[in-house]
Amino acid sequence: MAEITAATVKELRERTGAGMMDCKKALGETQGDMEAAIDWLRTKGLAAAAKKAGRQAAEGLVGVVVRGTKGAVVEVNSETDFVAKNEQFQEFVRTVTTLALDTGSDIEALKGATYPGAGSVEEKLTANIATIGENQSLRRAALIEVGDGVVVSYVHNAVTAGLGKIGVLVALESTGDKSALEALGKSLAMHIAAANPLALRGEDLDPALVERERSIAAEKAKESGKPDNIVEKMVEGAIAKFRKEMAFLSQLFVMDNKTKVEDVVAAEAKKVGAPVQVAGFVRFQLGEGIEKKESDFAAEVAAASGVGKAA
């Protein structure tokens, strides 16, 4: 049996593109025989999966699940929207979202979690890449919970229960009637899906985002040619408006477009029978923040066939 060293594992990884642990296992299974290990990886589909790893994955599904007073949301990406309709892919997203209830938002911890009957989540993902034939990635996860109250979920553009293009969780703290809280939570979650607030309150907005808006507002105000003191007031007014429009509680409720969300919550507290506090929310939209590559499909087909692109 050939000695299995860090150097041989590294060589196998460079030759196949497979993961470090998969390479180590392959060498162990083949008594350190490099060529046999390559064949072992190919047999398992792991080398093929690694070759797909460089391909962009910006489609896929967002999954949401609620258990008691705790909810989780996960985004799993694929290369094409077609895979989102694949039952194997859907089951993976559904299972991983449930696992996130216990692992939380740490992606590495989620990847290392035990997947039912298939080793780890990461190993199952690698196997799916090989069998489905597209690159896939477990991009992000979030967990939200309350002590006493409800966590309510909503999925927009759902392809099946709990899976879709936009996933929302909203947490409401209250000792009041839970069914009334659920109804309120569903309306608020639908608002979040549509209005895309960036923070609970204006003061919670990312300072870097606010400064970016301030710079844009300052440039616009300077173009007006007004005195500096007026320009300063124009900038502060623009920032105040930005905070109001981007913060959940100060947004106008989409159901009537005239009442602030915080006022809606206060009014509904009477039906709930106790004060209601919005403890937090999470909104995942599929592919947000991923810069999608533009491609010339005709050129790709021509290149693959060895025929020059027609003029």
Image: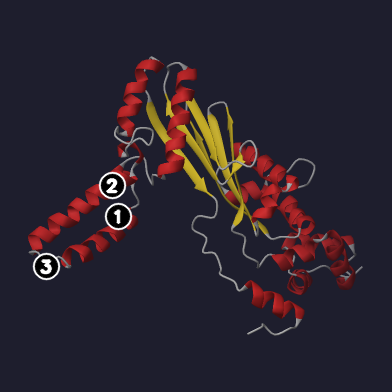
* Amino acid of disc 1: Val
Numbered disc 3: secondary structure: loop
Marks 1 and 2 in Cβ contact (< 8 Å): yes
Q: Which residue position holds label 2?
A: 243
Please tell me which of labels 3 and 2 falls first in the chain: 3
Place residue 162 in its image quadrant: top right
In percent of the image, x 59 and y 58: which residue is there?
58
Residue 275 visible in the displayed image: no
Q: Please tell me how many numbered marks the rendered image carries.
A: 3
| Residue 197 position within the rendered picture, expressed as x and y whole percent measured from the top left | 39, 44
Going from N to C along the chain, the mark reached first, 3 or 1, is: 1
CA neighbours of label 2 inside 10 A, class few (<14), some (14 to 19), many (20+):
many
Furthest toward the front, the residue is: 311
For disc 3, the neighbor class at 10 Å (few under 14, some 14 to 19, many from 20) is few
Please give left or right for residue 95 compared with residue 117 in the image: left
Q: Residue 35: which numbered mark, if any?
A: none
At label 2, which amino acid type do we have?
Arg
Categorize mark 1 by other alpha carbons within 10 Å: few (<14), some (14-19), many (20+): some
Left or right of residue 34: residue 161: left
Image: 127 above or below 291: above
Residue drawn 72% across the image and 63% down it: 19
**Separation of residues labelled 1 and 2 (CA atoms):** 8 Å
- Give the residue number, with chain letter if any, for mark 3: 225
The residues tagged by marks 3 and 2 sit, at their Cα atoms, a distance apart of 25 Å
